[in-house]
Each structure stands twice: as C-alpha cells, then as structure tokens.
Amino acid sequence: MDGFFIDLNVAEHINSGVMAFVQAYGDHFSAFTKWLLTNWLVPLEKGLLALPPALVLAVVAALTWHASRRWGLAVFLTASLYLIGCFGMWDKLMQTVALMSVATVLTVLLGMPLGIWMASSQRLRQLLTPLLDVMQTLPTFVYLVPVLMLFGLGKVPAIFATVIYALPPLVRLTDLGIRQVDAEVQEAARSFGLTRWQLLYSVQLPLARPSIMAGLNQAVMMALAMVVIASMIGARGLGEDVLAGINNMDMGRGLQGGLAIVILAVVIDRITQAYGSGRRERAALLKRKEVLA
C-alpha cells in the first residue's frame, strides 16, 4: 500500500518556511507584542482592576437601561455580575473583560472596513469569501500554532487567535447590511448631491446598523468562546478556573468558572442586542406597552 500513494507530505517544508519567517521578522513581532501589552492591554487591565466594583456595576446598569429602557433587565444583569464577585472571581472577570475589549477593538478595526469594502467590490467578495469560510471552519488549535511561534506564550497570542476566530461574522454581516440598503434610498441620496463617503456615513451605515450590531454581537460572543482556550496559552481570566477544574478534576471550580463565563456572555449579549434593535424598535415597544396599559 505504501507504494500506491504519492508522497505529498509538506510538513517539513511548512516548518522550514515558518522558521525562516520567524528568524527574519521575529524581532518585529516581539516589538509589536511589547507595544500592544504596554499601551493597550496592561493599562486597560490595571484600570479595570482599580475601579470600585460598585462603579462597574453601576455603569453596567446604566448601559443596560440606556440600551433597553427596561429597569428589570438592568437589575437582573447587574445582580448576575455581582454574583461573579460573590464567587471570588471579580479580578478574573476584569482580566477577561480587558482581554476581550482589546480583541473586540482590533476585530472592529479590521472587520468593519473589510465589510464595507466587500460591499462595494464584487471581486474582493469573491476573494475573501473562501478565506472567511476557512477562518470559521478551521479548528482553533491549527492557527494557534503559528501564532504561538510568532508571539510566544501569553496574552498577545490569545488576542490574535481571538481576532481570527471572531472576525468572519462581523465582516460578513457588515457586508450584508450595507448591500441590503434599499437601492432607491441610495439613489435618492445621490440625487441630492451626496458624495460616496457622505452616502456611506449618512445613509448606508445607519440603515445597516441592525446587521452590523448583530455582527458585533456574534464577534463578541465568539471572542468569549475563546476564553478557555486562551487560558491554555497563558492568558489569565475566567477560563483559568475552567481549565484548572478540568486538569485537577475539580468539578466545583470548573462549574463555577463556566457559570461565570455564561453570566458574562448573557450580559454582553443582552446589551449589544438591545443597542442593535435600534431606537425605532424600542419606541414601538414602549408604545405598545402604553396602549396595553
């Protein structure tokens, strides 16, 4: 049987190519890692840890009410986050929020421009669609290996692995939202003399907002799904307890860490969904409530 198959093993060629790339550009990646940690992640993490928990909970309550105009939801989500503090995991919660925040910002900075560009370029859409398919279907540990070789262990490779995993839904839904804007509305806007950029910022992005916010919601949820995997490569946070529970057969600690991640996911999901629903939907909901009352 050995003589039946053609030898197409490319592992050695890939390894040698990656090693050559690391040797040539490793210093640049190390410098970027230091810059990202020094200017973004570490200051944000220290700032969040320095904030009084009561202030953080008040901000969450205010954001929830502003997004949904529902005091019951605001109280429920705030109490849920307070429960994480009761578990003794407040510091790890802030570390996870800092990691997710940096990853989400990078995802938005990359994903929204790509989605906008895809909406205006059929050729780019044909080029990026299979790449996005691969990014969504490729097992996380496959692209984690080259990221670790370039950036080493720690929080930075966790951030980049999270960005790769969370990027596709934001790009796709930004592209979809802009392409679904009514052509007649765009034509009317052009007839009033709007330039291409004015059309984008004044018409297309506002009308595509629900789709873009849905993409952001999905990106944040997928970033949160990387919390446990990120803990495997040195990123601290809520995933650390889940990993420790698995390694030590400590069901209580693992379950508690998993519950904290679920709570954080619910809080973020409800707030982003409420903002994505838009003012018109919230106003219509309030009007229906007034009629029923």
Image (tube, rainbow, N blue to C red):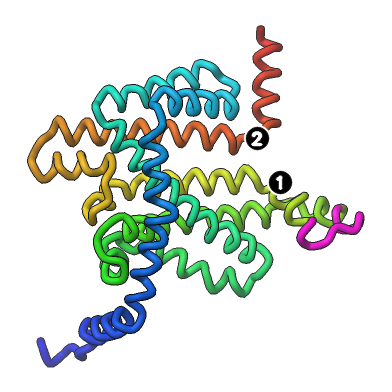
- Quadrant position of the C terminus in the picture: top right
What residue is shown at x 63% (from left), y 65% (from top)?
A: 117
Give the residue pinned by disc 2. Answer: 278
Label 1 vs label 2: CA separation?
Answer: 10 Å
Secondary-structure class at tag 1: helix
Q: Nearer the viewer, residue 138 or 29?
A: 29
Q: Is residue 241 located in the magenta-colored stretch of the structure?
A: no
Quadrant in the picture for the N terminus: bottom left
Whether residue 196 is in magenta: the answer is: yes
Classify 250 as above or below 104.
above
Q: Which residue is pictured at 35% across the width and 31% down the height?
A: 263
* Mark found first going from the N terminus, 1 or 2: 1
Give, as a three-letter code, the residue at label 2. Gly
> Residue visible at 64% across and 70% down?
122
Quarter residue 84 falls in:
top left
For this view, does 80 lie left or right of residue 173? left
Q: Position of residue 42 (x, y in %)?
A: 37, 49
Label disc, if present, on residue 207 of the rendered structure: 1
Q: Position of residue 243 (x, y in %)?
A: 18, 45
Give, as a single range, the part of the protein colored magenta.
189-198
Neighbor class of circle 2 (other Cα within 10 Å; few <14, some 14-19, many 20+) is: some
Q: Position of residue 43 (x, y in %)?
A: 41, 47
Residue 261: give x, y in percent of width and height.
Answer: 32, 36
> Residue type at mark 1?
Leu
